Amino acid sequence: MRHPFLHWLLRLPRHTAFLALTGGAILLALPVVAMLGGQAWVRILDLAILYVFLALGLNIVVGFAGLLDLGYIAFYAVGAYTWALLASPHFGLHLPFWVILPIGALLACLFGVLLGAPTLRLRGDYLAIVTLGFGEIIRIFLNNLNAPVNITNGPQGITLIDPVAFGAFKLSGRTELFGYTLVGPQKYYYLLLALCVLVVLINYRLQHSRIGRAWQAIREDEVAAKAVGINTRNMKLLAFAMGASFGGIAGGVYAAMQGFVSPESFSLMESIMILAMVVLGGMGHIPGVILGAVLLSILPEALRFGVVPAQQALFGKVLVDPESLRMLVFGLALVLVMRFRPQGLWPSRERKRELLAGEEGKA
Amino acid sequence: MSELLLEARGVCKHFGGVKALTDVSLTIGRGEIYGLIGPNGAGKTTFFNCLTGLYVPDGGGFTFDGQPLQADAPQKAAVRGIARTFQNIRLFGQMTALENVMVGRHVRTRTGVLGAILRNRATREEEAAIRRRAEELLHYVGIADRAGDLARNLSYGDQRRLEIARALATEPKLLCLDEPAAGMNGAETEELKVLIQGIRKDGTTVLLIEHDVKLVMGLCDRLAVLDYGQKICEDVPAVVQKDKRVIEAYLGEVPENA
Ligand SMILES: Nc1ncnc2c1ncn2[C@@H]1O[C@H](COP(=O)(O)OP(=O)(O)O)[C@@H](O)[C@H]1O
Ligand SMILES: [Mg+2]
């Protein structure tokens, strides 16, 4: 009896198997290579992969079901604060991850349904506005729930959050492994990578299932979808709930990884950023969304590393600070992509065809 | 008339001052091809929309297959066994023809989130069955060779056929077709007629809205004629054709293809 994975690998066409193996090897080696440039680079990798996870979660809502959600970061916040409150000195609770992560996912899911239920009739711009408001409400709550009873510790946020730990094995700090010293961010990388592989698989399977087809049908024509018997209300709630759960899980891992959360990490800008990753890469197309998330999370950081030394070399001082340059480049990238590649950087075949056909129609 | 399948009792629907339907009652027997005709704006599509739950009637109601029809959500009508096509075709444009029909199987299949994620044996078998049935139906309506094409790229006639295949995928007891021959040429209309007769022969009752009087007369067992939202006549084609009120209603506008 061969192992199913091996079986799968052997059945693939040779070049696909080769790609899968090299891709896997590169992904596994990446944190070791990045470490040569310092721990900061490994952290950037961690964030990139966390954003891939988040973007794929949002992709279920926006890409599959076609519901424009501008408040996605709220679910991330719910997950992060769930972890922070249940595993920190703030309440003196230190629950293990296998208790907190499901609670965080469940709570986020609940909030997803809470947001979804009253907005079911809304579409497009209107839905975007309501979800945007929802995201801000959550952030403002987190900011102000420190009086009369101190729950969230207000704008100061919560510190000294427990790391992810499997028994005595903590993901923070250093570990010796076969003579190689693994630092915390490297260990988190592997956890996040595993989670990401899982969410890619889930995305892919959902898309090519009865559920995924129902979502796409709703996206294309809601009236026709109802007429063939799809319960559009339940299907939309399901999309909201699933997207939100993934947001909650990502939030939990983020809180544990950073060891600190505060409301300002969950601003509207973050929601927009994640949405931009989904749209820029190619809405509903899984490889496209991954590409979008990687690009939009790594480029700004690379910019930060490159810009200061470059300016010092050229002008002898720093003229434009990296943060404002980041926004400038981000805005420019969005405008350029929307102008020249409205289907996204790596769209699915159908969407490409649709936009091309649209162009011909205009001509 | 055979055993009763659908009974409409005093259905009313108003839009502000427009009385789109006033007190429309009719009965359709199992296995019939039943025609609903009338000039433009007579209320035929509105009747469909009330029947399939898209509109909530202002008065009256339906009994379908022996039980009252809760007309508050379109998906319930589909579950009960009422499928429809639309006068202005509503396909899932960016899905392939095959996928469109596969969506039609949604209401008769059960795979949930967990099943979809785990993709266990039950899911795989159901998925294969969905695909097989969808392919059969594409073949049945005569567009098997277009299975992989996006619905929006099909010809007009093929889109009409695809809509019928998608509706049939829900295993309806009653298939409602809203002007299926609109925009078709003579040969296509003739093929459509054969298709509709086949559907009835295979056990599905058909409710047909049509503008093309010739098609309706040759195809339907019985007809109802609507004019300004009121049923002015209901009988077999030979009788309806001679009805004075029907002739008046149709002389109000230039008869098509006449
Ligand atoms: N959603 C609606 N809002 C307002 N008026 C409507 C609506 N739907 C139909 N009507 C009106 O009801 C009448 C009947 O329309 P319809 O049922 O589409 O006619 P038919 O299908 O027989 O051509 C028309 O006068 C039409 O303008
Ligand atoms: Mg009509």
Image: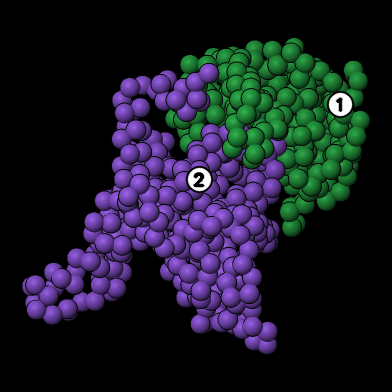
- Residue at numbered disc 1: B5
**Which residue is nearer to you in this view: B2 or B247?**
B2
Name the residue type under label 1.
Leu
User: Which chain does tag 1 point to?
Assistant: B
Determine crowd level at label 1: few under 14, some 14-19, many 20+ residues with C-alpha closer than 10 A.
some
Kindly identify the residue that appears in the image at 39 percent across and 42 percent down: A287
Kindly identify the residue that appears in the image at 64 percent across and 35 percent down: B115
Mark-to-mark CA distance, 1 and 2: 48 Å
User: Which chain does tag 2 point to?
Assistant: A
- Residue at numbered disc 2: A199
Chain painted purple: A
Any part of residue A124 in sight = no
- Mark count: 2
Name the residue type under label 2.
Val
Chain painted green: B
- In the rendered view, would you say B73 is above or below A173? above
Which quadrant of the structure image shows residue A122?
Answer: bottom right
Relative side of A132 to A13, left or right: right
Question: Residue B224 at x, y = what percent?
Answer: 80, 29
Relative side of A24 to B242, left or right: left
Looking at the rendered image, the disc whose residue lies closer to the viewer, 1 or 2, is: 2
**Which residue is nearer to you in this view: A324 or A66?**
A324
Relative side of A184 to A249, left or right: left
- The circle on residue A136 is none
Q: In the rendered view of the protein, which quadrant contains the C terminus of chain A? A: top left
Any part of residue A288 in sight = yes
Which quadrant of the structure image shows residue B16?
Answer: bottom right
- In the rendered view, would you say A123 is above or below A317? above
Question: Residue A259 at x, y = what percent?
Answer: 48, 69
